Amino acid sequence: MKSIIDWLISVEEMSYTTYEKAAGYFHNDKEFSALLIQLMKDEKTHHDILTRAAAGIMGRTELQPIMIKLPDDTRLQIEKYFLSVDKKIETGSLTNEDMLDFIVSIEFSELNDIFSYIVNTIRHYYSEIIPLAAGMHQHTRQVERYIESHPESRKYLERIKYIPNLWEENILVVEDEPDISNLLQAILNKEGTVETAANGMEALQKVQGKYYAAIVSDVNMPVMNGIDFYKKAIELYPTIKKRFLFFTGAFDYKIISYLNQNNLRYLLKPSPVKDIKDAVSKILAL
């Protein structure tokens, strides 16, 4: 296991170094450069967590024997990708399409399967690696969202749609209108596992039994409204405040004033699908 973990650590180092160089290379393309900078930061975090995990499990006799091998051709192919990008940066011949092809080839390659296996093996013995699993899911979703928003890059969607998730975030939609609840489920189902509640009371019962990385709640609902649900939820779990996004058609001054005064995220109905996805993705990234 040690040799594979050491290699994964070296790949993470190559990744954040390459993304940092590429971000500078594409500095005139602000959106693409921003994506590369975020990927670079993610890879640096992954490298540091994996390095600590490797030290944390060193000498553990109860570790399960590893059931996979790292084929030489896989290792050489992955390393070849990095060498190719570095050479094109040095010669000034790297195109946007070249870089996007590299990102997809790396992030959605057999490397991901190996990474997934190692993380899921280690997490039983070193729980501190769990944030890496969660972070990897958001990391790859950033790439997917960029591709989805650029029609000229849609050809990559077929290559990435079957990638397995290292981690599945739980999202709670609190909405009494079935049509709106179903719509939000459809919009958010690629971000994680979406559950629903028809009112604040039902939602409160759910958050008492499970952690939700994002809660999208209506305000005006029967039995218990969204504001009362929020107040009771933060009494139980103060840090849950940052997990809320209110999606409301209520234009009542007092409600909007309360949301603003408490620095709560909210969107007014109707809102563009992109705005909903972006708002939830920001919460998941916290």
Image (tube, rainbow, N blue to C red):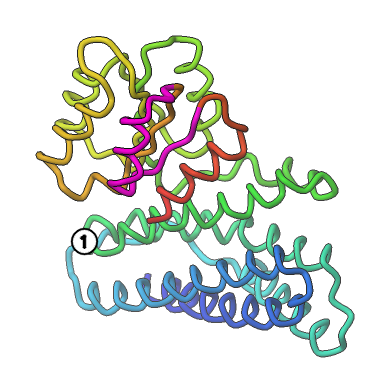
- The residue lying furthest to the left in this view is 236
Which residue shows up at 25% across the image and 45% down it?
241
Label 1 crowding class (10 Å Cα cut-off): few <14, some 14-19, many 20+? some
Q: Nearer the viewer, residue 74 or 106?
A: 106
The magenta region covers 250-268
Q: Which residue is mark 1?
A: 125
Q: Is residue 252 magenta?
A: yes
User: Which quadrant of the view contains residue 245?
Assistant: top left
For the image shown, how many numbered marks are present on the structure?
Answer: 1
Q: Amino acid at mark 1?
A: Tyr
Secondary structure beneath dot 1 equals loop
Q: Residue at x 46, y 51 (%)?
A: 282
Residue furthest out toward the front: 253
Kindly indicate the quadrant of the structure image that contains residue 203: top left
Q: Is residue 197 above or below residue 208?
A: above
Residue 194 screen position, x and y as percent: 41, 28
Q: Is residue 273 left or right of 96 when viewed as pictured? A: left
